[in-house]
Image (cartoon, rainbow, N blue to C red):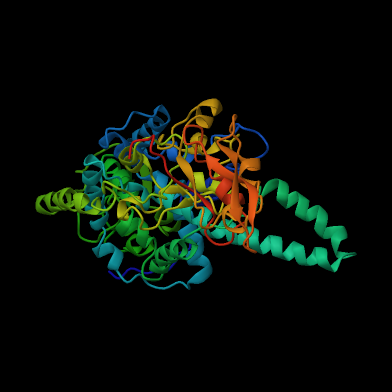
Amino acid sequence: MENNTQSFAPGASQPAPWRGWVLARRLSQIFFWLFFCWLFLQATYSGQEILHWPVDLFFRFDPLILAAHVLTRSPLIRGLLWSLLLVGLTFVLGRFFCGWICPLGTTLDGCRRLLYSSRPDTGYALRLRRFKYYFLFFLLAGAFLSVNLVGLFDPLSLLYRTLALFFYPALAYGLEGFFGQLYDWGTPFTWVSEPVYQFLKDTILPFRSQVMLLPLFTFACFAAIVALERLDRRFWCRALCPLGALYGLAARFSWLRRRPYKLCPDCGDCQMICKMGAISGDAVPAHQTAECQLCMSCLEQCQKGRVAFKFGGGVARPALDLGRRQVVTAVAAGVVAMPLLRLRSAAPQPDEYLIRPPGVASEMEFLSRCIRCGQCFKVCPTGGLQPLWWEAGLEGLYTSRLVPRLGYCEYACHLCSQVCPTGAIPLMPLEVKQASPMGTAFINPARCIPYTEGRDCLVCEEHCPTAPKAITFHEGEVQDLNGKRMPVKLPRVNPDQCIGCGICENKCPVGGDAAIRVKRSLRMEI
């Protein structure tokens, strides 16, 4: 029977206690979406060294991240064990996370309502729904080989990354420009605009305006997922989402089952109502618990009041029918493809300007633990931590790096280590972080003002935060622009004292490439 989005009014015979389930589900979706956004806003510098809210809470309850973390044989992070609670509930209730909690699923539902008119499903997602399971096996096989690409496709990481790199900077830029224009107009506009702006600055706007890299590519990936909604409702969830596939494997054994088990011979409306395509026409049982998100639409819209969800068995569980050959092929593809994807990142001499966050001692360990969630980008008060593009190959895509010209690593800050859910950026006391080298600064005499113009410039030494300072001066003579030999203070870097924070490069007054740049530390494992 053709899928479509036709709605049916609830019949009078429907039991009254069930009528509120769809409303409860929608309220749950709105609550968890707002909670996700609120935690997103709390991941910011507020004048204190310690974050008081568990801003990585959603990632702690993500079993896909836990599975990949275990397969990479990384040291266990206890906070990730909370995800086992959701897995246990999935064995009882089914795939409720996708329909009641997942913020990306809620975002897709909202985008479909706002952007697309109601139309019949094309059926592509229904035909491709096994793909998400094969894709899950592909990613987990790669994680076993320590090539962890799960974070690129995890729905929580994907949404958080999109907010951090595109929507939030765009919102901040727009609001700053709008209120800046009102300020230029002066009174009476500022009577209202300034209190509102101060409120937004205290609650929503970032500590400092930031420029993020890869915003358009990030938005294009998100827009592609939203565009798939035009083909089928919840296309991403039905055909592509690896987290949904993991929950689907557990939901197949759920105790909560739908009645009736097969379509009523005189109706069949449920098959048209279900946005997940979880009800098939000829199969017995017709209800696929691995695909059902417990949206309760079939229950509420059943005109005859026959649909119910109850605990217990009574009928054989529906088979996933993935096919042994296809599963083996997916695993084998992951085993074969992942070493090829690592060719660039495993180079013996990585990019000398690829500076990792503080505390990262091993490049390979960092790549295997990072889930590309984007929390470190969001929380960095200077905007120095930025997403990586292709400098370390596909394996390094969206991992974090320090770009000193955009922002330095604040000496008195270790927020990035507090938000990292997998320990890719190790959690450590501030004094340990301050002694951990990320790189070493090098001076280019061909661009440095004292060397090229014969006049003093003290900027890099003044801003150096270490004690004693890593940048000092020695007296020397340099030919100035008029050809005269002039005594000047020539800067030099003590590599044993430099931690590579990048503030010297950030503050260097030379345009373009700074006269002093930070390179990967020779004192850390490459």
Left or right: residue 206 versus residue 154 is right
| Front residue of this view, candidates 110 and 157 | 157
* Residue 10 visible in the shown view: no
Q: Is residue 74 above or below residue 196?
A: above
Q: How many numbered marks appear?
A: 0
Residue 365: quarter of image? top left
Q: Residue at x 58, y 50 (%)?
A: 506
Query: Where 338 sits versus 239, above or below?
Result: above
On the image, the x and y values in percent for residue 511 come to 59, 61
Quarter the N terminus occupies: bottom left
Seen from the viewer's position, the closer of residues 330 and 485 is 485
Work out whether residue 307 or residue 408 is closer to the camera in this orientation and state it. Answer: 408
Q: Residue furthest front?
A: 484
Residue 313: give x, y in percent of width and height: 26, 38
Residue 212 is at least partly visible in this image: yes
* In the image, residue 48 above or below residue 39: above
User: Is residue 267 found left or right of 403 in the rendered image?
Assistant: left
Q: Quadrant of the C terminus?
A: top left
Residue 454's image quarter?
Answer: bottom right
Looking at the image, which residue sits at the far right? 188
Q: Quadrant of residue 254?
A: top left
Q: Nearer the viewer, residue 416 or 198?
A: 416
Q: Is residue 166 left or right of residue 153?
A: right
Residue in the image at 85% along x and 64% along y: 189
Give how far across and how far down residue 426 sits, in percent.
44, 32
Side of 430 where 482 appears, left or right: right
Q: Residue 405 in the image: state x and y as whole percent.
A: 55, 54
